[in-house]
Image (cartoon, helix red, strand yellow):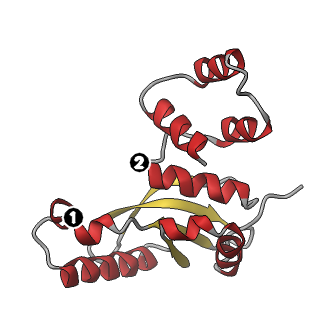
Amino acid sequence: MPAMEVMCWALRNGTSSTEIIACATREGLLNAPAQSVFRFTTPFAENGGEARAFAAMILCGFAPLAQQVEFVDPQTGKRYRVDFLWRTRNGRIVVVEFDGLVKYRDPQMMDGRTLGGVIDDERERSEGLKRAGVDVIVRIRMDDLHDLEGLKQRLEGGGVPLRRG
C-alpha cells in the first residue's frame, strides 16, 4: 500500500507514469504488486490515507472506481466531492468516504467549530449527497485498512462491485 501512496503523490505532482515505470524498472522494483499499483494508480487521491484506501480496495478485488466526483445538493446548492464512487450495473451510486480522525481533532481542520458542529456538518453532507442521488455511503477509516477481509466484507455489504474476470 505504501507504493500506491508514493505513486499517487508522484502523479499528482506532475511526474509521468512513464518516468515512474522507467525508474522502477531501473531499480528492479517492477514486481507483480508494483505492476498492479501502476495499472490502477491515479493522481486523484488528495492525501496519503486516500491513496492507501484506494490500494486496499484494489487488493480486495473491487472494480475500478471514480475519485473526487462532485455532487450538487439540489435543495441547498452546496457542492460536495466524494472520495470514491462506483455506479453499479443496476444504476445505483455507491460512495466510499475515507474519514481521517484528524478532522475531529485538529483545530485548523475544525475551522473554529466544536466537535458537535463537525459531526453535524458531516451528517448534513451525507443528507445532501443522498438528495443529489447517492444511494449508499460507506465510511471507512485508516484502522479499516489493516483488516482487508473485514474491509472487503463491509464494502461488498454496501454494494461496492468486485472486478469481473
Compare residues 21 and 44 and report the one nearer the observer. 21
Viewport quadrant of the C terminus: bottom right
Residue 114 placement: quadrant: bottom left
Q: Residue at x 46, y 55 (%)?
A: 49
Give the CA separation, mark 1 to mark 2. Answer: 18 Å
Q: Residue at x 43, y 73 (%)?
A: 132
State whether residue 58 is above or below residue 43. Answer: below
Relative placement, left or right, of 109 versus 151 is left
Q: Which disc, if any, is residue 9?
A: none
Q: Secondary structure at mark 1?
A: loop
Counting every numbered tag in the picture gives 2
Residue 129 placement: quadrant: bottom left
State whether residue 131 is above or below residue 72. Answer: below
Relative placement, left or right, of 126 versus 152 is left
State whether residue 36 is above or below residue 158. Answer: above
Give the amino acid at mark 1: Asp
Q: Residue at x 56, y 62 (%)?
A: 85
Residue under label 1: 106
Relative placement, left or right, of 165 versus 50 is right
Q: Position of residue 97 (x, y in %)?
A: 47, 67
Give the amino acid at mark 2: Glu
Q: Position of residue 131 (x, y in %)?
A: 42, 79
Residue under label 2: 46
Q: Position of residue 146 (x, y in %)?
A: 60, 65
Callout 2: 10 Å neighbours few (<14), some, many (20+)? some
Q: Residue at x 45, y 79 (%)?
A: 130
Q: Secondary structure at mark 2?
A: loop
